[in-house]
Amino acid sequence: MQIGSERRQHERYLLPSMYTAIDIRPGEEDEFKFSGHAYDLSVGGMRFELDEPIEPGSEIGVRITLPGAEHLRPMHRKPIYALATVVWVEQDDLESGGPVRMACVFKTFCQLGDEERLEARLKSGRYSLAA
């Protein structure tokens, strides 16, 4: 790999972090146990924060509720569901006692149309590309 080369396969979009709600369920559990916010998102993964850290390598279920869907048809307002793997945790946040920033990569989308709806919403012009 070249130094400075872009490793991501998908364009990332900046999100209004305090308005992009996410819910996380650990591993094979049925219930969403953690709530937080996403900072940036692509069809390949996201950067987010929770009050509790999740160990890198952990499998999680994710529910993403994108803001600004009020004007969309009901089927396009639905949350996005995915299975993901946590890939990093911001070490400085572990010592601060506040919310912890993390990132995950999506392994699969859970419901028919989730990936397509996510991509359409991200490319709608509402969100800025991340650097």
Image (tube, rainbow, N blue to C red):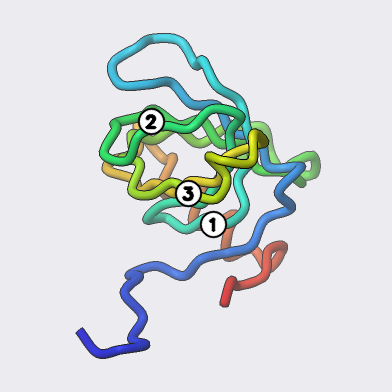
Quadrant of the image occupied by residue 111? top left
Q: Residue 111 carries which label?
A: 2
Give the amino acid type for the residue marked by disc 1 in the picture.
Answer: Ala
Distance CA(mark 2)–CA(mark 3): 33 Å
Quadrant of the image for the N terminus? bottom left
| Location of residue 79 in the rendering, given as x and y in whole percent from the top left corner | 57, 32
Nearer the observer: mark 2 or 3; the answer is: 3
Q: Name the residue under label 1.
A: 120
Other-residue count near label 1 (Cα within 10 Å), few / some / many at <14 / 14–19 / ≥20: few
Report the residue at 26% width, 39% height from top.
Answer: 57
Q: How many marks?
A: 3
SS at circle 2: loop
Could you say which is closer to the camera, residue 88 or residue 59? 88
| Location of residue 106 in the rendering, given as x and y in whole percent from the top left corner | 34, 45
Q: Name the residue under label 3.
A: 91
Quadrant of the image occupied by residue 40? bottom right
* Of the image marks 1 and 2, the number of the one nearer the N terminus: 2
Other-residue count near label 3 (Cα within 10 Å), few / some / many at <14 / 14–19 / ≥20: few
Report the residue at 58% width, 59% height from top.
Answer: 122
Give the amino acid type for the residue marked by disc 2 in the picture.
Answer: Gln
